[in-house]
Image (cartoon, grey):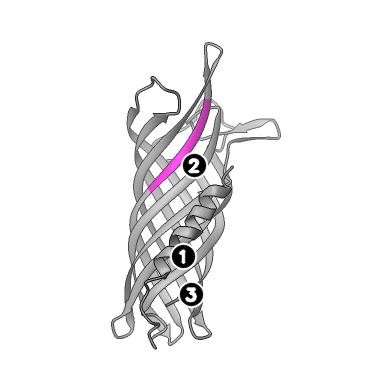
Amino acid sequence: MKTPIWILCLGSTAMLAAPAAAQSDDPFTGFRLEVVGGYDQSRAGSSIDDDADEDNDESIEGFTYGAGAGYDFNAGGFVVGVETELTDSTGETDFIDGDFEGIGFGTAVDVGRDIYVGARVGALVTPSTLLYAKGGYTNARYNIEASFDGDEFRQSIDADGFRIGAGAEYTFGSNSFAKLEYRYSNYSDGEIDFEQDGFDDVDLGDIDLDRHQVMAGVGFRF
């Protein structure tokens, strides 16, 4: 069901590559495209506590995957850049040894697409190795199934928040690179979007949802 988002993600970045300028001699300057994947955990934030069920660790885990694009500029040993990313995730609520693992959004939740736009800044520790920090805006979708009075309802929560992270990037060959990074996201504003006709969107107001990811990526610079 999630394959079309993955195809769209790759297709979009491929189209962006078409008008890219010729590759710079500097391995950390220019337009880049990458694919990413790694560990993904969403969990209830510090202001939310499921006291009714001490066995619920209030988290759901999965594998996140997607593609990104960005542009970097080497300013004399310091690299600054902008970037965007579209990912999806296999994370979903589950029963583990008979215990329900959920994050308070409903009886059946799966993690949907995530859109990120931000910037990064880093320092070259060797001519081919960059250590960097990043931050920006993220919008995540959580798909929910629920029932009321015998009727089944499907809706999604669009959550707005911020992301910060840090990582290392290593160039190899003429224009290839690999990266490893940790990122933390917090979502503090949410809206319910109903799939059924006749239901208006509902503003949830303040929410508190944390997300932890450890990501690896490979890509090319143009």
In magenta, the rendered stretch is: 139-145
User: In the depicted view, which residue is nearer to us: 164 or 81?
Assistant: 81
**Residue 194 coordinates in the image, percent (x, y):** 42, 27
Q: Is 77 in front, or is 146?
A: 146
Q: Residue at x 44, y 62 (%)?
A: 13
Which residue type does callout 3 highlight? Phe
Asked if residue 177 shows in the view, the reply is yes
User: Residue at 46% of width from left, 65% of height from top?
Assistant: 14
In the image, 125: left or right of 97? left
> Which residue is denoted by mark 2 in the rendering?
43
Crowd around label 2: few <14 · some 14–19 · many ≥20 (10 Å): many
Callout 3 secondary element:
strand
Q: Amino acid at mark 1?
A: Ala
Which amino acid does the dot numbered 2 rest on?
Arg
Residue neighbourhood size for the residue with mark 3, other residues' Cα within 10 Å, grouped as few (<14), some (14–19), many (≥20): some
Spatial distance from mark 1 to mark 3, Cα to Cα?
Answer: 11 Å
Quadrant into which the N terminus falls: top right
* Residue 165 in the image, given as x and y percentages of width and height: 41, 61
Hey, which residue is sitting farthest right in the picture? 97
As measured in the structure, the alpha-carbon distance from the residue carrying label 3 to the one carrying label 2 is 33 Å
**Which residue is the site of mark 1?**
14
Q: How many neighbours does mark 1 have within 10 angstroms: few (below 14), some (14-19), or many (20 or more)?
A: few
Mark nearer the viewer, 1 or 3: 1
Displayed quadrant of residue 30 = bottom left
Residues at discs 2 and 1 in contact (Cβ within 8 Å): no
Q: Which residue is mark 3?
A: 220
Principal SS element in the magenta part?
strand
The residue mark sitting in front, 2 or 1, is 1
* Residue situated furthest top in the rendering: 149
Q: Secondary structure at mark 2?
A: strand
- Give yes or no for residue 142 being in the magenta stretch: yes
